[in-house]
C-alpha cells in the first residue's frame, strides 16, 4: 500500500513513537544528563551562608564587574510585563480547561506546516493494521522516544487525538513557548520523580496545568507551576503568606507535588487515577470507582477510562489524562508535530541566606545581575522583597554567592530597601500614604506614572521609593484578599457586558477591541481580581 508522506509521519509520531524505540526527539531516563546534588537540605550556621545549587552540571560564565543597566528596572515595568505574559498563558489555559477544544476558540491561524489530524492518523492506522491495530502496532512502528506512562494503549483515543490538534492549532504559539520553558525544569523534575519511584513523564502535567509558569493563577485560585490550592500547599509543607508563596517556587513546589502524587498513587494504585485525583481530588475518584459495577478488587490505568466513559467524572477531569497523553506525545517529539523549539537552559544558582527585609533589586545589584534574573530565580517573593523579621534563602546566579554575602554584610541597613509596595485602604490619599512611609508625594508620583490622588482604589498597589530610609515596622501593609467583582441585579445594557461561564477579562477585552488594562481600570479591577458568571462589566470607549 502506498502511504501519503504526511500520514506516514503521523503514524510514526502518534502510534509508532508511543509503542517503542529508543531514539527520536525524547530523552530516555538512562540518557538524562546527571543532575547536580541538591544541597538545600539544611541552612549553614552563618546568617549569610552561601550554598551552590544547580539544575545542570554545566558552568555559567563569570559575571561582569559592573552591574548591568537593566538591574535598575522599575518594579512597575517588571510587574506589567509579567502580568501581560501571565495573561497570555491564562488565555490558553482557560480555553484548555473549559472543555471540548474548538478550532476557532482562540481565532488562531493555521500553522505553516499542516497539523497532523487525529482522524487521519486513526483512519490510516485501521487501513494498515485493521481495527485491532489501534493498540497493537509496535512491530511496524518507526523508532521513537520511550514513555514511562502508558501512552501506547490510548494514543488513538478520540479525546487524545482532539487535544493533539488543539495543541497544534488553537494554542500553537503559546504551546511552543511552554515547550521551551520545559528546558528550565525538566532535569530537576525528573530527578525528584525518579527519587519517589514515580514515572518521570508525569512532569508533563505542568504543561497542561500551567504551561510551566510559576506565576499562573487559576480562576479557582490555584497558583504556580503545579497549581496548588493554598490548603493543599500548606498540608505538604509550603509557605503561603503575604510575603512568600512557595507555590510559585518551582523547586519547593515540585517537591510538594511529587510527594502529593506519590501519596495519590499509593492510595489509588494507578498513575492515571493519581493524575485524575490531582485534578479533581481523591474523594471524587474513589466515589467514582465505588460506582463501577462488580467488585473492584484491582484498578489500573484502564479504570480511569471506565470512569470517563460512564461520565462518573466531571468534564475537565475526563479530559485531564487525554490532555496529558497528547502533551506528552508532542513534548517528546516536537519537531514531528511541526514545533520549532529552542529549549531554555536549566537554571543554575547559588543560595544566600538573607536575615531581614531586603529588596530583590538590591540583591540584584549586589549580584551584578538584573532584577528580572532574580525574579525568575525567586518567584516566591511575591512583593519583590524578602519578608521582614525572618531569615530566608535567596537564589543568585551561579558563582556569585560568596560575593553577594560579603557585599551584603557591609551594606547599611538604610540601603536594604529601595521600594516597598503599599495597598491602598479605604479613605487613604497620596498624602496619607506619603506620611506613613516618611516620603514626599512627589517621590510617590514619580515612581507611579499616571497615579492620581483622587482616583485611588481600595486595594490598589502603590510603589513607595525608600532609598536611604528604614521602613518603619508599622508601615508595612498587607495585600488584600483576592477580590470578587459583584454586581447588582441590574441588567447589562449598551456599553456593558454580562460575564458568561468560562469567560476571562482578556477574552472580553479582545471581544470589544479594548486593552485589558483599560478594561480593568474602568471597572476598578486588578490582574488579581476574579470575575464570576453574571457579573456586569462596563466597557470603556475605544482609544
Image: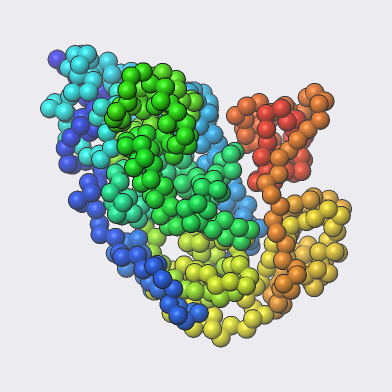
- Foreground of the two, 14 or 78: 14
Q: At 36% across and 22% down in the image, what residue appears?
A: 306
Q: Residue at x 16, y 28 (%)?
A: 138
Residue 326 image-quadrant placement: top left
Q: Residue furthest left?
A: 139
The image quadrant that residue 242 belongs to is: bottom right
Give whichever of 337, 274 is nearer the camera.
274
Above or below, comparing residue 478 to residue 45 in the picture = above
Position of residue 84 relative to residue 38, above or below, is above
Residue 216 visible in the snapshot: no
Q: Quadrant of the N terminus?
A: top left
On the image, the x and y values in percent for residue 248 come to 51, 54
Q: Is residue 444 left or right of residue 413?
A: right
Residue 382, quarter of the rendered image: bottom right
- The quadrant of the rendering that contains the C terminus is top right
Please name whichever residue, 85 or 301, is drawn nearer the observer in this view of the structure: 301
Is residue 363 shown left or right of residue 144? right
**310 over 363 or under it: above or below:** above
Q: What colour-coding does the image apply? A: rainbow
In this view, the residue in front, 371 or 390, is 390
- Residue ID at (72%, 55%): 461
Residue at 49% x, 26% y: name it. 314
Residue 472, given in percent of the width and then of the height, sits at 74, 73
Count the marks.
Answer: 0
Residue 482 location (% of width, % of height): 67, 46
Would you place residue 215 above or below residue 281 in this image?
A: below
Relative image position of residue 355 (x, y in whole percent): 56, 76
Relative to 531, is 98 on the left or the right?
A: left
Amino acid at each position: 500500500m502506498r502511504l501519503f508522506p504526511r500520514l506516514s509521519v503521523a503514524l510514526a509520531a502518534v502510534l509508532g513513537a508511543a509503542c517503542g524505540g529508543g531514539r527520536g526527539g525524547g530523552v530516555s531516563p538512562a540518557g538524562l544528563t546527571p543532575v547536580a546534588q541538591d544541597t538545600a537540605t539544611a541552612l549553614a550556621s552563618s546568617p549569610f551562608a552561601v550554598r551552590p545549587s544547580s539544575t545542570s552540571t554545566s558552568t555559567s560564565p563569570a559575571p561582569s564587574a559592573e552591574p548591568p543597566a537593566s538591574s535598575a528596572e522599575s518594579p512597575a515595568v517588571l510587574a506589567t510585563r509579567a502580568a501581560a505574559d501571565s495573561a497570555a498563558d491564562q488565555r490558553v489555559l482557560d480555553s484548555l480547561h473549559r472543555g471540548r477544544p474548538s478550532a476557532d476558540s482562540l481565532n488562531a491561524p493555521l500553522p505553516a506546516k499542516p497539523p497532523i489530524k487525529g482522524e487521519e492518523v486513526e483512519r490510516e492506522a485501521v487501513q494498515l493494521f485493521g481495527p485491532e491495530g489501534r493498540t497493537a502496532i509496535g512491530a511496524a512502528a518507526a523508532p521513537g522516544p520511550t514513555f514511562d506512562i502508558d501512552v501506547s494503549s490510548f494514543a488513538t483515543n478520540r479525546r487524545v487525538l482532539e487535544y493533539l490538534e488543539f495543541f497544534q492549532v488553537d494554542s500553537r504559539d503559546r504551546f511552543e513557548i511552554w515547550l521551551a520553558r520545559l528546558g528550565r525544569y525538566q532535569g530537576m523534575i525528573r530527578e525528584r520523580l525518579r527519587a519517589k519511584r514515580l514515572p518521570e513523564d508525569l512532569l508533563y502535567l505542568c504543561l497542561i496545568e500551567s504551561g510551566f509558569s510559576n506565576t499562573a493563577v487559576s480562576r479557582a485560585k490555584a497558583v504556580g507551576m503545579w497549581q496548588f490550592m493554598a490548603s493543599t500547599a500548606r498540608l505538604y509543607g509550603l509557605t503561603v503568606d503575604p510575603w512568600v508563596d512557595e507555590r510559585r517556587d518551582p523547586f519547593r513546589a515540585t517537591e510538594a507535588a511529587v510527594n502529593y502524587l506519590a501519596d495519590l498513587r499509593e492510595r489509588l494504585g494507578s498513575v492515571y487515577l493519581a493524575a485524575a485525583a490531582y485534578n479533581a481530588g481523591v474523594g471524587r475518584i474513589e466515589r467514582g470507582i465505588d460506582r463501577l459495577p462488580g467488585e473492584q478488587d484491582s484498578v489500573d490505568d484502564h479504570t480511569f477510562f471506565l470512569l470517563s466513559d460512564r461520565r462518573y467524572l466531571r468534564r475537565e477531569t475526563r479530559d485531564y489524562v487525554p490532555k496529558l497523553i497528547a502533551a506528552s506525545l508532542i513534548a517528546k517529539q516536537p519537531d514531528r508535530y511541526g514545533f520549532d523549539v529552542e529549549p531554555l537552559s536549566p537554571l543554575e544558582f547559588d543560595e544566600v541566606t538573607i536575615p531581614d527585609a531586603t529588596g530583590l533589586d538590591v540583591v540584584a545589584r549586589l549580584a551584578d545581575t538584573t532584577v528580572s534574573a532574580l525574579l525568575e530565580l525567586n518567584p516566591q517573593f511575591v512583593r519583590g522583597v524578602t519578608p521582614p523579621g525572618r531569615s530566608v534563602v535567596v537564589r543568585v546566579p551561579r558563582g556569585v554567592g560568596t560575593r553577594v554575602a560579603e557585599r551584603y554584610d557591609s551594606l547599611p541597613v538604610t540601603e536594604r530597601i529601595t521600594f516597598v509596595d503599599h495597598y491602598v485602604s479605604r479613605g487613604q490619599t497620596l498624602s496619607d500614604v506619603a506620611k506613613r512611609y516618611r516620603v514626599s508625594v512627589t517621590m510617590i508620583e514619580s515612581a507611579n506614572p499616571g497615579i492620581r490622588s483622587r482616583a485611588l482604589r481600595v486595594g490598589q498597589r502603590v510603589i513607595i521609593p525608600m532609598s536611604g530610609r528604614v521602613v518603619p515596622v508599622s508601615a508595612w501593609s498587607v495585600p488584600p484578599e483576592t477580590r470578587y467583582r459583584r454586581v447588582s441585579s441590574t441588567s447589562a445594557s449598551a456599553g456593558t457586558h454580562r460575564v458568561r461561564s468560562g469567560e476571562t477579562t482578556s477574552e472580553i477585552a479582545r471581544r470589544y477591541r479594548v486593552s485589558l488594562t483599560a478594561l480593568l481600570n474602568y471597572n476598578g479591577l486588578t490582574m488579581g481580581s476574579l470575575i464570576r458568571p453574571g457579573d456586569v462589566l462596563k466597557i470603556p470607549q475605544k482609544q
